[in-house]
Amino acid sequence: ILNVEQSPQSLHVQEGDSTNFTCSFPSSNFYALHWYRWETAKSPEALFVMTLNGDEKKKGRISATLNTKEGYSYLYIKGSQPEDSATYLCAFSSGGSYIPTFGRGTSLIVHP
Amino acid sequence: NAGVTQTPKFRILKIGQSMTLQCTQDMNHNYMYWYRQDPGMGLKLIYYSVGAGITDKGEVPNGYNVSRSTTEDFPLRLELAAPSQTSVYFCASSINQNTEAFFGQGTRLTVV
């Protein structure tokens, strides 16, 4: 079982704040790192799939970076809006099984 | 496109009953997955399939069975339902292990 850790577990910010959270994963035998956004009462939706060390991906106000050598990825949200409130999941796959293992998620609440 | 469709959306089972959760996708994806989501625990992989006729266990397979007779369908069978199987179940599919997964809307199952 691969150990995928996300921090913090939850986060409350004010509208307009920028924020970031972390996904930590084993640094050996890296294959891919996925980020998903999961709104309450909906199903997870993919944000990014990252495969190369140093990868940076961006979608609107959300961006992500990847460091496979030290085993972490950061997700950044610039100028948070109430509609950004969701749980953000990361999923790591290794060169062993290739099937993604999910972290427990970071719950973000953006207050107007 | 319908994407990934799960049925039913809700179900209450009595201890010892059995049922099948249906999952179908119309994107011609090779990979399909079943996850369960328990409060505070993220998504745990039950079973997955990399193509028709091929299935494999995930992290928490006990008490479940799957089959993959076609590319489109990946039903999850619960035999002898137990209270520990009370959870929200998500089916997902992807082109391969390196691409984003698309999730169904989930099935909320309660075993009493």
Image (cartoon, helix red, strand yellow):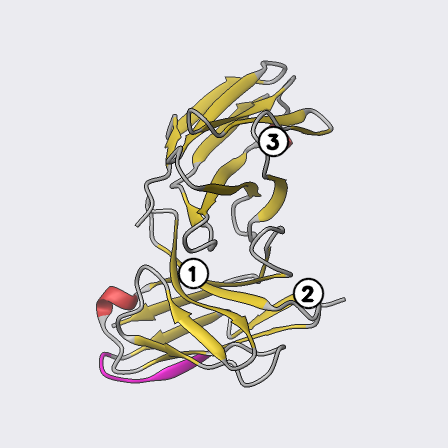
Mark 3: give few (<14), some (14-19) or many (20+) Cα within 10 Å: some
Q: Quadrant of residue B40?
A: top left
Marks 1 and 3, Cα distance to the nearest angstrom? 24 Å
The CA span between labels 1 and 2 is 17 Å
Instruction: Magenta stretch: give its range.
Output: B15-21
Q: Chain of mark 2?
A: B
Q: CA distance from mark 2 to mark 3?
A: 24 Å
User: Looking at the image, is mark 1 or mark 3 nearer the viewer?
Assistant: 1
Numbered disc 1: secondary structure? strand
Residue tagged 1? B35
Crowding at mark 2 (Cα within 10 Å: few <14, some 14-19, many 20+)? some
Rendering quarter of residue B62? bottom left
Q: Residue at x 56, y 52 (%)?
A: A42
| Observer-nearest of A17 and A68 | A68
> Which part of the image, by quadrant, shows the C terminus of chain A?
top right
Residue A30: give its label: none
Measured along the vertical axis of the image, is residue B30 above or below residue A79?
below
Badge 1 crowding class, 10 Å Cα cut-off, few under 14, some 14 to 19, many 20 or more, is many
Residue receiving disc 3: A84
Type of amino acid under label 2: Gly
Give the image location of residue B5, x and y in percent.
Answer: 61, 70
Q: Nearer the viewer, mark 2 or mark 3?
A: 2
Query: Is residue B46 found inside the magenta-colored segment of the image?
Result: no
Q: Amino acid at mark 3?
A: Asp
Residue at image location 47% in from the left, 53% down from the top: A98
